[in-house]
Image (spheres, rainbow, N blue to C red):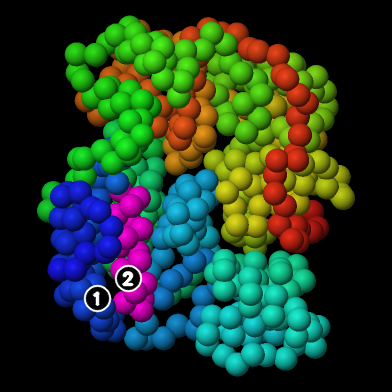
Amino acid sequence: MTLPAITFSHDQAEAFDRIAEAFLPLGVDLDEGSLLPPREGQSMVWAVLGKAGSGKTLLLSELFKALEDCGVEVVSGDYESRRRKDRRSVAVLAPTNKAASVLRMQGVPATTIHRIIYTPVYDPQYERIAEWLAGEGERPEIEALTDAALDRAAAFYKINRSIPGALAAAGLRGSDFITGWKRRDEPLDIGFVDEASMLDDKQFEDLQEIFPILILFGDPAQLAPVNQSGAMVFDRLDEAAKLELHRIHRQEASSPILDLAHALSDPALGFEDFERLVEETAQRDDRVVWASRVEVDLMARSPVLVWRNATRIRLIQAFRNVHGAPEDALLPGEPLICDGIELPLKHRKRRLDLEARGLIKGAQVVYLGPGRKPGFSRLHVIGAPDPQVSAASIVKIEKPDEEEPFIPFAARMGATFLHGAAVTIHKAQGSQWETVQVFAPDLYAAARMGRVEAGQPLWKRLAYVAITRAQERLCWVVRNRLSKPTHPLTTEDLVAPAVPLELAAEEPD
């Protein structure tokens, strides 16, 4: 068949061909660029597996482009046109905002799993603009908007393919055109899921209900979700439904980070041997750093990766101390991690609002300052399409040797946050940062304990996940010491959208 105009390795080309062949009886012909309406009862679940650098994301991207060239409609989670029985659609999903944003930067309109499960409800007046932008209606006349505003919306959408962004460019706020969120009540068609090693059984079941055709892209060397005994959802698929990529592609620049990650597969390699390898690599390549202390300046935007919670809490307290943060308040620029939503069932709509805007468990957030109401915070959600929100917040600052966290301020209910200057390696899965600091004494503790997970020493799985979070530079921290900051905390590095979004405008009763 005719492959996309890109250099594929042999295993990528084989995987592309096998998936294209599996699509044929499902009414999708990537070779001829033709589609047939979906048929009830047809389903498929496949997995594309490979370690870091093996080309999973490139293959996902090219499969997506091939489907788009066939005329398959893209479902982004921002806006969905009226359903037609003959429509074929594709959605690209990731478990976290950060993972979705990595795909978006590569031209793939990815969204989070939460954002596809919950769909926005548009105000009928402004839905006419969305239909026009999506090519399904005439240019509307809206009393509240000028022709120039509509032109701005059209120009924005042509470049960015975002309905909410286009409406914001026209001068509207999110609360003007999105009146609420509802759980999807009808299935879609084709779903691609990146970082599938992070999926738990419940998420996988939800996705199978929504997508009769599902392709998972995952790394079997990563850590399995907590409480799943080291198993990943794709482990139970038939071998015929698994495609493995073996060749490493991100080697054009001779990546020392990937070299270290893949060295961990040697069963004879012990922890001390691996540390010698890290030190030797650092001596010849400045992309790997043998660090005698944690660099505090980096912690504001890329957390130190640790194994033990006690280590995480000590590093967070040290970070706050060196910045002179008061106990009863947060400083603008402090990093946070969303730890879930605390709302009763009667406030389900508000929960959907928060989750759909990116405040899902594990989301990375930067504190911008207090909101207009007590207990509210202005926040920047890293990787979210509309990153700046104001939400009812419960912020918990954990302290060493204290069972209960200190809560400097809180709404009665809302989104809950832990500090994000340090995170466990488990929580770091699905995210990447330009520079990553790995706290090696924690991995040494795991090595000494001799724990094994899914047949692999736990310290090696931890080290593999931690190392592969680094895009450009890896700092292997070997001492329990912290540097002094070279500048105060700031928010100037965060790019704001045209219109910040207000969430949960009234605190729950």
Which residue occupies 67% across, 34% down?
Answer: 335
Q: Is residue 214 visible?
A: no
User: Which of the pair 6/153 is nearer the observer?
Assistant: 6
Which quadrant of the view contains residue 311?
top right
Question: 10 Å neighbourhood of mark 2: few (<14), some, or many (≥20)?
Answer: many
- Nearer to us of marks 1 and 2 is 2
Q: CA distance from mark 1 to mark 2?
A: 8 Å
Membership of 342 in magenta stretch: no
Where residue 313 sits: x, y (%)? 61, 20
Question: How far across and how far down the image is residue 404, in percent?
Answer: 67, 23
What's the residue type where badge 1 is placed?
Val
Q: Which residues make up the magenta segment?
A: 56-72
Residue at 65% over, 20% down: 296
Contact between marks 1 and 2 (CB within 8 A): the answer is yes
Where does label 2 land, which residue? 67
Q: Secondary structure at mark 1?
A: strand
Q: Which residue is mark 1?
A: 28
Give the amino acid type for the residue marked by disc 2 in the picture: Leu
Quadrant in the picture for residue 275? top left
